[in-house]
Amino acid sequence: MKFFIDTHDAAKETFPPGLTPVQFDGFFAQYEEACAEEEVVILRVHVAYEAGRAFCFTMAPNADCVRRAHERVSLPFDSICEVKTATPGDTFFRPHAA
């Protein structure tokens, strides 16, 4: 499994304008189901309701799985990007070639 972040922005018409927490709650159940069908594990979703933006952090076999989960619920996105963790243990304390 790989890590992915996908983004949504009302300015780019990929985040519903005026979305409320109650509306998001109703939609999220559908999105969870779509993710399960596509082998996508939702780790976190960060939503800025007033700014009209969202950032979803997921695990999946590949970006196509994340894309298909979005398509199942007609959820547009700006980008889906594979990311890696960058904690000191992940990045900075690896053995380096001499």
Image (cartoon, grey):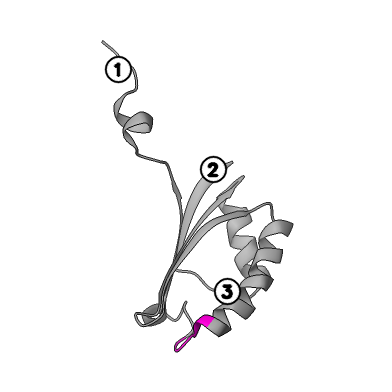
- Helix, strand or loop under label 2: strand
Looking at the picture, tell me which residue is in the foreground, 80 or 86: 86
Rendering coords of residue 40 (x, y %): 63, 54
Predominant secondary structure, magenta span = loop
Q: Name the residue under label 3.
A: 75
Distance, label 1 to label 3, CA atoms, is 42 Å
- Mark 1 and mark 2 lie on one chain; the one further toward the N terminus is 2
Residues packed near mark 3 inside 10 Å, few (<14), some (14 to 19) or many (20 plus): some
Looking at the picture, tell me which residue is in the foreground, 66 or 33: 33
Q: Name the residue under label 2.
A: 2
Q: Name the residue under label 1.
A: 96
> The disc labelled 2 sits on which kind of residue?
Lys
Q: Quadrant of the C terminus?
A: top left
- Above or below, comparing residue 98 to residue 76 in the picture: above
Tag 3 near tag 2, CB within 8 Å:
no
What residue lies at 36% left-to-right and 29% top-to-bottom? 89
